[in-house]
Amino acid sequence: MSSTTPVPPGRPRAFDIDEALDRAVLVFWSKGFEGASLDELTEAMGISRPSLYRAFGSKENLFYKALERYTEGLTAYFARALAEPTSAAVATAVLHGTVEAATMAGFPTGCLGVHGALATGDESRPVRDALIAWREDGIAHLTRRFQQAVDAGDLPPSTDPHLLALYLRTVANGIAVQAASGSSRPELLQVANLALGSWPKP
Amino acid sequence: MSSTTPVPPGRPRAFDIDEALDRAVLVFWSKGFEGASLDELTEAMGISRPSLYRAFGSKENLFYKALERYTEGLTAYFARALAEPTSAAVATAVLHGTVEAATMAGFPTGCLGVHGALATGDESRPVRDALIAWREDGIAHLTRRFQQAVDAGDLPPSTDPHLLALYLRTVANGIAVQAASGSSRPELLQVANLALGSWPKP
DNA sequence: CCCCTTCGGTACCGATCGGTACGGATGTGC
DNA sequence: GCACATCCGTACCGATCGGTACCGAAGGGG
C-alpha cells in the first residue's frame, strides 16, 4: 500500500518531527509552558524558529502536541493501571507508576501535567485550562473504573467512586509536587504505600 | 517609648507598606512569581514602579516579603495545628486548614507556596529554591512534632516521624493542586478525611 | 526543463519584560 | 529658612519575548 505514504509535494522535511517533539517534551517538562522560551525549545529540538512554526503552528500548539506525546509515552503506566483486575491493584499501580515517572533518572522531576502551568500570566490561560482538563480526564477514567469495581462487588456498594478517584489523583499530584521539590523515589514509595493503607476493602 | 517609632528623615511614605504587601500577595498567589508582571503588581498595590523598588528593592525581594506575610497570615492555621494535643489532631487540623485556605471565597484558589513557582525559567530559580525550602520547613516542623508524639507514646515506637510528615505534606500539596484545578471545598474535605483514615493509632 | 510547493535559515518586527535616571515635592533638624 | 534626606511619578533604558517576511534550496509533476 503506497497510499499510506503519499509523498507530499515540495521540499521534504529535514528533521524527524517526533524526535523534535520528544525534545520539546523535556523542555516543557522542566520549565513549564511560560518558562520555556522559543530559544530554548529550538536549540533543544535542533531546528530553527521558522521550522518550528511551519511544523507546529505556534508555541501553544507545540505544547499541546508535546502533552499528547507525553501522555502516550511517559504516562502510559496510567492506561496499564486501569486494566488491573482489582481496584486496589489499580490504585497501587497508579501511585507506584506516578512515583516512578516523577523520579526517573535522566528526566525532569515531577509531572508535566501538574506543574506545567499551575499559576501563570493571563496569556497562557488556555494552556492552564487544557492542563486542568487533562487532570480531570484522568479522574474521569478512574471514576469509571471504580464504578465498575463497585458493580463487580470489588468495592462496597456504599463506596463513592468519584471520591476515590479524586483521592488518588490528589495523592498523585502531591507526589509530583514533592518529586519536583527534590524528594527521593524511596521516600515517595513509602508515602504512596501509606496512602494506599486507607483503601477500602471489598 | 518614642524610640520605638524613631521618625525617619526625609519625605514620609504616602502608602501603607503592609497593605500594599497584602495586595501583592494576592497577585503572586494567583499568577505565580513569573506570571505576575510589574504592571499588574503596581496597579494592584496602588503605587508607582519606583515606589515599589524603593520600598522592596526588587521583584524577587517583594516576593519573599509577600511569602513571609502570606505565611504569617493566611497559613497561620499551620502553627495552630502544631499545638494540637495528639498527632491525629495535628494531622486533621493541617489537612482541614489546607482545604479551607485553598478554597477561601474571595481569595485565589490553591496555595502560594505550592504553585508559586513549580516550573519556571532559569532566571527565577532562586525563587523556586526558596519555595522548596519553604515547603521543607513545614515538613521539618511536622517531623519534630511527630517525634514528640512518639516519645510521648501518642504514636507507636516503630513510627517514622519523617515519613508521616512527608505524607501529610504530600496530601496537602495535592489538595492545593486540586483546589487550583477547581475542586470544591466539600469534595476536598472528603478527600482529606479519607487520607486521615490511614493515620496510625497509638 | 520549468513550475509549483514546501523546506531551510537570517534577519527582522512590535510588544512587553524588569529595572532606573531624573527632577519636583514634602517632610525633619539645625 | 536653609540643608538634607527620602518620597513621588514620568519617561526612559536595554534585553528578551513570541512571531514572521523574505529568499535561496530541494524535491515531485507536467
Image (spheres, coloured by chain):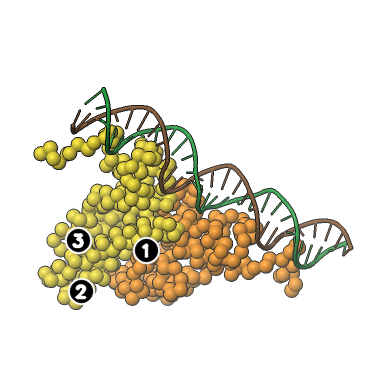
Chain colours: A orange, B yellow, C brown, D green
Residue at disc 2, secondary structure: loop
Residue at disc 3, secondary structure: helix
| Residue type marked 3 | Val
Residue ID at (44%, 68%): A108
Residue ID at (21%, 70%): B161
Percent position (x, y) of residue B150?
15, 71
CA gap, disc 2 and disc 3:
16 Å
Query: Which residue is at the front of the view, B100 or B170?
Result: B170
Residue under numbered circle 3: B90
Mark 3 Cα shell of 10 Å, populated few (<14), some (14-19), many (≥20): many
Question: Are dots 2 and 1 in contact, CB under 8 Å?
Answer: no
CA gap, disc 1 and disc 3:
22 Å
Mark 2 Cα shell of 10 Å, populated few (<14), some (14-19), many (≥20): some
Residue under numbered circle 2: B159
Res B135 quadrant in image: bottom left
| Residue type marked 1 | Val
Quarter of the picture holding the N terminus of chain B: top left
Percent position (x, y) of residue A103?
40, 72
CA gap, disc 2 and disc 1:
24 Å
Percent position (x, y) of residue C1?
89, 63
- 1 and 3 marks on the same chain: no
Label 1: chain? A
| Residue type marked 2 | Thr
Res A115 quadrant in image: bottom left
Query: Which residue is at the front of the view, B182 or B62?
Result: B62
Q: Is residue B189 visible?
A: yes
Question: Are dots 1 and 3 in contact, CB under 8 Å?
Answer: no
Residue under numbered circle 1: A177
Quarter of the picture holding the C terminus of chain B: bottom left
Instruction: Please state which of the two labelled residues, at mark 2 or mark 1, is closer to the viewer.
Output: 1
Residue ID at (38%, 57%): B117
